[in-house]
């Protein structure tokens, strides 16, 4: 008599609804369109997901990295997941299960209808010497209250770009952070469905030891959103709330988030920082961290490529230009300055090819890119051109930069 076939067990990919901040990054990243959402949750379709992991590194909260062993025939459906308020616990599997769980579909391009996992542009690991970050200490259900101790505009008053530097103090409550991490702000009020708003994510603009060294505070760089991506009038719920806050107002905060876009911690590590607009926030944090270490002999080279429409729309222009030139090599790409040709950060990377190449050749160099989504391809092309010009193979270097946690993107 034949033995009964073992029950097939799946390692089902799930998203934790309690931690997810609904930023849409996973849905945009998934190469096979396995991720979908409604007004309640982001979920993974068990019929489509091939376990390729492309969505895992870009998720700012780590809510994407959840897995449950289930009997294939009993996999949680999209409908089940859309209704969840929290993840289900682990199931007890029947004794006659197959020994090895399988991913939902083979991550194999040779299988018809299943796309190969794309090669991500950036690293999915932090630099080897990065400090260990704390993440998700506070969630939607358990936010922490911070007090506004500063809120001022960092762009010219007569310009369209209303960008604010906002300082939040946590008092006695622990909120440990590292440069490159982000936090979530819960705006008050409800969405169109009458439910509390989900958190909006902002990168820290201050270093680990506080906006003011030794204080339990941090800063954010927030642009008031008055238009959608197509240029139509729109009112950004959280950006307007934050830009209008007064001193001593309180805000609900969750996080911190982020475990890969972190700065190296070993002596004489070099930083190439490439940003546009408010994408300058983590670059300010890393630059200030380095500035506070000046005189220790531990600081490597800092090279900054910073894009903005005009000088007056470039956040932190004044303080940035006061930094010593032998501390940081500043390259400003202005795209709408009257009487000047339009320039993007990638144009300047090409202009500074020789210096960029020298830094890239040093294994102590880490590269950070933050800002508009559209710059990602342009920056990668520019780095490739710089490397290829010197007769080197970009694909080999790109792979090493990703593997060694030396190339990081945070673009929206
Ligand atoms: P912006 O003022 O719209 O643009 C800044 C500069 O980038 C302008 O000079 C713009 O040129 C240029 N630019 C446009 N497309 C480009 C491309 N394909 N390649 C290179 N440069 C390009 O910027 P913003 O409104 O501040 O937006 C910054 C972005 O950073 C947002 O998407 C935001 O979500 C993101 N971000 C913010 C934070 C934060 O903590 N606040 C953190 C991470 C990321 P043009 O004259 O052609 O427009």
Image (cartoon, grey):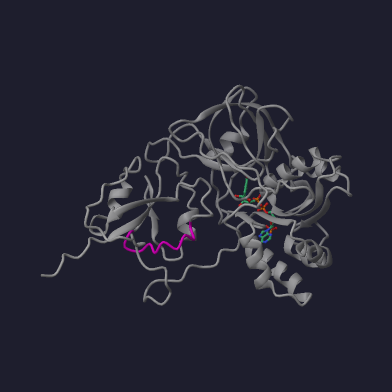
In the image, 347 versus 95, the foreground residue is 95
Q: Is residue 174 above or below residue 260?
A: above
Residue 247 can be seen in this image: yes
Q: Position of residue 91 (x, y in %)?
A: 28, 47
Q: Which quarter of the rendering shows the N terminus?
A: bottom left
Predominant secondary structure in magenta?
A: loop
**Residue sitting at x 39%, y 64%:** 50
Residue found at the far left of this picture: 1
Q: Of all residues shown, which one is farthest toward the front?
A: 1
Q: Is residue 194 above or below residue 31?
A: above
Q: Is 195 above or below relative to 227?
A: above
Identify which residue is drawn at 73% across, 64% down: 346
In the shown orientation, is residue 269 left or right of residue 168?
A: right
Nearer to us in this view, 297 or 231: 297
Residue 75 magenta: no
Please provide the residue range marked out in magenta.
46-55
**Image location of residue 267, percent across then percent down:** 78, 47
Residue 119 found in image quarter: bottom right
The number of numbered badges drawn on the structure is: 0
Residue 148 lies, in percent from the top left, at: 63, 27
Q: Pinpoint residue 292: horizontal percent, then vertical percent.
A: 79, 37
Q: Give ligand 1's quarter of the image.
A: bottom right
Of 192 and 324, which appears nearest the observer?
A: 324
Residue 337 in view of the camera: no
């Amino acid at each position: 008599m034949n033995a009964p076939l073992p029950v097939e067990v799946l390692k089902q990919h799930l998203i934790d609804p309690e931690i997810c901040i609904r930023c849409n990054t996973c849905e945009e990243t998934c190469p096979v369109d396995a991720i979908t959402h409604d007004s309640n949750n982001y979920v993974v379709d068990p019929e489509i997901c091939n376990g390729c992991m492309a969505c895992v590194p870009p998720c700012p909260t780590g809510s994407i990295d959840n897995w449950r062993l289930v009997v294939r025939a009993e996999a949680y459906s999209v409908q089940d997941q859309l209704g969840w308020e929290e993840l289900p616990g682990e199931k007890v599997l029947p004794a006659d299960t197959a020994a090895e769980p399988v991913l939902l579909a083979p991550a194999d391009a040779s299988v018809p209808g299943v796309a190969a996992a794309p090669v991500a542009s950036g690293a999915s690991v932090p630099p080897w010497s990065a400090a260990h970050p704390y993440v998700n200490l506070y969630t939607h259900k358990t936010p922490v209250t911070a007090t506004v101790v500063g809120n001022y505009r960092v762009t010219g008053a007569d310009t369209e770009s209303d960008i604010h530097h906002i300082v939040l103090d946590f008092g006695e409550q622990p909120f440990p952070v590292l440069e490159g991490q982000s936090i979530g702000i819960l705006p008050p009020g409800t969405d169109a469905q009458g439910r509390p708003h989900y958190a909006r994510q902002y990168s820290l603009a201050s270093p680990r030891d506080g906006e003011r060294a030794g204080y339990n505070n941090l800063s954010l760089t927030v642009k008031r959103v008055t238009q959608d991506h197509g240029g139509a009038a729109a009112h950004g719920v959280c950006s307007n709330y934050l830009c209008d806050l007064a001193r001593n107002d309180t805000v609900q905060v969750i996080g911190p988030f982020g475990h890969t876009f972190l700065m190296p911690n070993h002596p004489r590590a070099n930083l190439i920082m490439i940003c546009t607009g408010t994408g300058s926030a983590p670059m300010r944090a890393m630059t200030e961290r380095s500035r506070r270490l000046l005189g220790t002999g531990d600081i490597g080279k800092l090279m900054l490529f910073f894009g903005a429409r005009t000088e007056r729309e470039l956040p932190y222009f004044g303080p940035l230009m006061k930094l010593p030139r032998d501390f940081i090599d500043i390259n400003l790409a202005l795209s709408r300055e009257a009487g000047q040709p339009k320039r993007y950060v990638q144009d300047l990377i090409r202009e500074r090819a020789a210096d960029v190449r020298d830094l890239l050749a040093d294994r102590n160099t880490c590269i950070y890119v933050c800002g508009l989504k559209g710059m990602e391809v342009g920056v990668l092309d520019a780095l490739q051109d710089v490397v290829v010009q010197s007769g080197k193979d970009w694909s080999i270097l790109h792979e090493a930069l990703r593997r060694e946690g030396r190339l990081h993107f945070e673009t929206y």
